[in-house]
Amino acid sequence: MRQPDGDGIRTVSGGSSDVHGNKEESDVPFDPDATGIIPRLTFDEEPSGGDAPADRAGKKDADGKGSGSLPADGDAAVDGDTAVDDDVDDRAADQTATFRIPSALHIGRPPTVKEAEAADLASAGTVSMPVLTETEADAETAEDASTSAGASEAVEATRAVSRASIPLRADASGESQAAAGPSAAAPVAGPAPAPAPVPTPAPAPTPAAAPERAPESGAASAATTAPAAAPAPAPAAAPAPAPAVEPVPAPAVAPKGGAAPKRAGAAGGVMGRLGALVASAPTWLPVLLVLEGLVMYVLALKVPPGPFRGVDPSKIDGLGLISALPPTAFLAILIMIVSFFVTVAQSTDRKFLLLFQIAAITFALHGAGALVASEPRFPTAYIHAGFVEFISRTGESAISIDARMGWPGFFALFAFVTKAAGIQDMTTILQWTPLLSNLLYLLPFVLILRQVVATTRARWFAALLFVLVQWIGQDYFSPQGFTFALYLAWVAILLRWFGRVEPRTKPIPARGLRRLIGRLDAMTPGELANTGTFRADKLLMFMLLVALFLASVASHQITPFMMLGVLTAFLIVKRTSLTWALPFFLGLAVLAWISYMTVGFWSSQIDAIFGGLGNILQNLRSNTGDRIEGSDPAHAMVLQARLGILVVILSLAATGLVRRLRRGVFDRSALILLCVPVLALGLQSYGGEIGLRIYMFALPGACLLAAYAFFPNLPADSADVREETVPLRRRNVRFDPQLTKKLSVVLAACFAVLFAFAFLMARYGNEKFERVTTGEVEALHHVYANDKPSARVLYLVPKLGPEVTPTMPWGERDVEIVSFNVQALVHKDPSQIADAVKALQEQPRNSYLMVSRGQVSYLQLNEGYSADWGERFRAALDASPDLKRVYSNADAALYTWKKFVRGTETPEPRPYKTARGEPTSPWTPVGIAALGLTWATLFGYEVIRLNGPNRARRARRRLLYLAIPSFVVAFAVIIERFLYIAANN
């Protein structure tokens, strides 16, 4: 059945009901292909005329009361061979489905003790809860006081009142069971007629018909509760006064599984409890497995190295961290993945357990570096910490120090947080940011998954895939990792609060490309529509949407373009209720930030910024740069693992898309999330990393479509439910759908294990030089302690070039004082130190040549330097008469020039403030005014439009008359600034 959840449909288990004779067989266990949302109960008025359908009102008894049954999930109850009731089409039209209960059922008081006992046993099987009238409630009170003769007569008189029951659940066999108390479960002793024989199947029987009410003459004849659909008729003779009888005790209700309860100490008690424990293993076994795997994994990585335990960093080779992991770590990951699939395969929806299992797997995969390393990994994280320290200390952002300071939103945020919290050392933050980032990514991604029409298994498997294939490594302490979380939240808000799903009403063209597009448009949407959202909620979420975009504009260079591309694509394919005013508003914000706030960066580098526009092939060739290229045979396998994950996940995504199309479902949103990031190839190479960023932003759509490769079906209660196996041709033999469901789970588990082990190689394949040691950090701390008034650090490179990043923890402090802009050329022959010595000789006092373990490992894995190159190179530097070693440990050494010319002083650091200010253009004031007017008018237009497409049309038209010319002026001034400033600087 489908349940409205504010903005769309939530699905739960489906089922069907048939009527066989006098007994309804209703098998409605939880279906893992459903979404598991609890249905809502509503009440309908009695039909005005005609016979009520059997699935709505049931049979009426003598006084107009009747009993009704709940239709099964997704399927309306069937009256013989008739069709489902007409409300099904109405519910499908507005995407809302509810349980319909006839209003003749009177529920007007809290349940009695016996009713509560029966309700508590509902989880044990099929339980029928009695719906009592006020007279019957008095009867139970009278029965408790039946020791007196007068009370006995009252009890006997009220027992003749009919009781209606509503079957709530069904056991494994699909048969209804009664557990409503004495009068509903067993016949009452007394002069009652014999039970009526079971009649032949009636045309429209009810699941539980109410017995006939006693005649209105003073005494009542006893009524019996029989399993037959129609109760036995009252005796023809005049009823005689009923004698007082002993109260009949309530029969014991069988526990789950149908077995009668056993007394303590009964025969087979130990074996019975053992059997019950084994039978309940699906409940507690996944919890035990995931906890066991988590504890085993932590112990395997944190204990001292030994047989089958601990990690020895000296064993890390070209394969990365995976070469030093103990076998118990792999076994622990396998146990956690098995635990996840054991839970997914169950006929229950355990959301919190599944989320905890995915979080545990995330901890094992993305937290491995923090568990093993003594210092935060990834050298570039340290320079970002240096930007935070600079902004916190000076309160300013200086683009002249580094171009990344032109987008200071991320750094300013953490500068505020660390200063407000009094944090002086950011080591802990740097070390655990990768794990925390990936856990943060899960929250908006799960919200995205809630907005797609998919089974429970498909959604949770997509969430697991998102964790397993996210090996890019941009989740460290960086603006990219931060804004990727903003991107996911942006997409989640678009789908959740501004989603739009409209059925096609136009006829499909007869031929050509338009016919293909029309057929795709007529398919079942793969997304849920947004319905039932209050205007205030929409306005709040719209403002949050704009705030997220502006935060990403101020923090990163690429993320705003990804957001803008997704919004534009949603508007083109009609998957959002927003208008075209918003992309113009946001696009102008991006251009304005680049033009006005980063002018110090692009004023002298126009060619570097715009030179790569349109060079798709060149950007594709340089998309990975030096990070994944290597000549070491073992390290080459890391490149193969990364490319293998890319090829497999894209192949699964294509397979999932095809399988969904064959079921008549077109997943536009998932396809947009996959394809829009690819357009970034037309921007620029982004330092040789644009391919990695494209893969990162395409993951949400790729993982969702890849999950459909294994679980492509619609939820079990959808109107378009298809079988698990759809043949390519009708003459092909179909496999058993139940078998294919099991095979799908097994295949998904195998791919998950494969992705998990490939992830360890792809993510930590560069661990030999991306891992930061304590010795390297201490060497640079020596530089920071002696950097007054300035200092320079030279780093080793195999070739001189602007895109080579130091592979050492650089820039953690004093970013405006210590310079890391000087390179020292080295050769494969470690004895050739002339170029490195010359580079150091050309620098002023307080300059250092640093030789570190990370730099040497990088040269060995990526440039083919010998295994002992580092030791021999340091020995050659020690033997040089012109150099002096000022600091050294096992991981790093610092060298400086031995003799300087007398009178040479350490220079002052380069000022990060320019005396003449930022360059500008004559039309800049006009452009700023036009920008403000454009933003105000477009924002007002969109806010008014949130109230409905027909609200205040005249006011919106006037706002557009102001917005269009002001937008043209603002855009023209931005172009004028680029041309004028670039020509004069």
Image: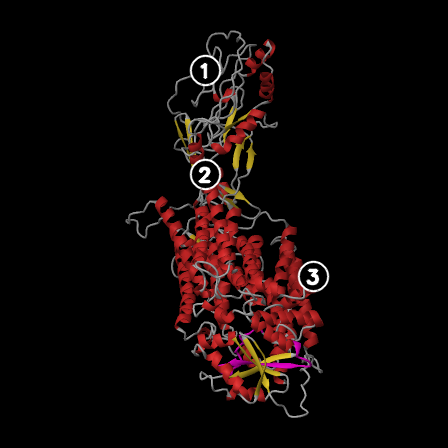
Q: Are marks 2 and 3 in contact (CB under 8 Å)?
A: no
| Sequence-earlier tag: 2 or 1 | 1
The residue depicted at 68 percent of the width and 76 percent of the height is: 924
Give the residue number, with chain letter if any, for mark 1: 233
Give the residue number, with chain letter if any, for mark 2: 280
- Which corner quadrant of the image does residue 388 belong to? bottom right
Q: Amino acid at mark 2?
A: Ser
Gap in angstroms between the C-alphas marked 2 and 3: 48 Å
- Which corner quadrant of the image does residue 584 belong to? bottom right
Left or right of 904 on screen, residue 772: left
Between residue 940 and residue 124, name the one nearer to us: 124
Q: Are marks 3 and 1 in contact (CB under 8 Å)?
A: no
Give the residue number, with chain letter if any, for mark 3: 421
Q: Would you call the spot at circle 1 few (<14 residues within 10 Å), some (14-19), or many (20 or more)?
A: few
The residue depicted at 49 percent of the width and 77 percent of the height is: 856
The question of residue 947 being in magenta is answered with no
Report the coloring of the rendering: secondary structure
Between residue 977 and residue 154, name the one nearer to us: 154
Question: Magenta part of the protein: which range?
Answer: 785-809
Q: Is residue 368 at least partly visible in the picture? A: yes
- Which corner quadrant of the image does residue 805 belong to? bottom right
The question of residue 803 being in magenta is answered with yes
For this orientation, the residue located farthest to the bottom is: 902
Gap in angstroms between the C-alphas marked 2 and 1: 45 Å
The residue depicted at 42 percent of the width and 63 percent of the height is: 645
Which element is circle 3 on?
A: helix
Q: Are marks 2 and 1 in contact (CB under 8 Å)?
A: no
Q: Is residue 528 at least partly visible in the picture? A: no
Between residue 90 and residue 58, name the one nearer to us: 58
